Amino acid sequence: MSTMSQTRHSVQDVVTRQIDALNRHDVETLGATYGAGASVWDPQYPELLKGRDAIVTDYTEFLAGFPDLQVTVKRTVEQGNDYAVEFSMTGTHKGNLITPTGQIPATNKRIEIAGCVMGQIDDEGRIVDERRYFDFAGMLGQLGLLE
């Protein structure tokens, strides 16, 4: 089997494990899909999330705010160790949403937003770089937080 085939299989495997763990709200397994020194850019943060612990904390806090969160993959594109995943995300804001500017108490409103994640895995099949693109303003609007 060629290295390229193994890499492509690894990308799909990592994406599948990541989304499955996210939908089960299994942050331990979700965290294991990231390399120890991984970095994540997210539109709600002014700086990169650096390291697996910071990324796990982010997922833990977001899932506490949306305890019924579910992600549906629409399309995955792979090229070598790079990938892009188009998704939709739904959930009900039933817990505190922690942001860099403070906590947003539960609104009990439902969100449905689209997004895309672009990333790169290492040769061990762990995510080392991730860029999240989703409609953060649309999410805040659906929660009734924008005028």
Image (tube, grey):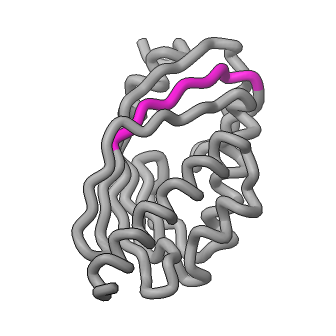
> Is residue 95 placed above or below 142 in the rendered structure?
below
Main SS class of the magenta portion in the image: strand
Q: Position of residue 106 (x, y in %)?
A: 73, 22
Would you say 75 lies left or right of 38 here?
Answer: left
The N terminus lies in which quarter of the figure? bottom left
**Front position in the image: 141 or 87:** 87
Splitting the image into 4 quarters, where does residue 131 fall?
Answer: bottom left
Which residue shows up at 47% across the image and 46% down it?
44
Q: Total number of numbered labels?
A: 0
Outermost residue, left direction? 79
Q: Would residue 55 be counted in the magenta stretch? A: no
Q: Residue lying at the far front in this picture: please name it.
A: 1
Q: Relative to the observer, which residue lies in front, 85 or 114?
A: 85
Residue 102 appears in the picture as rendered = no
Report the span colored magenta.
Answer: 86-94
Instruction: Decide if residue 140 is on the left or right side of residue 6.
Output: right
In the rendered image, which quarter is residue 62 located in? top right
Q: Residue at x 44, y 53 (%)?
A: 42
In the rendered image, the vertical position of residue 29 relative to residue 117, given as above or below: below
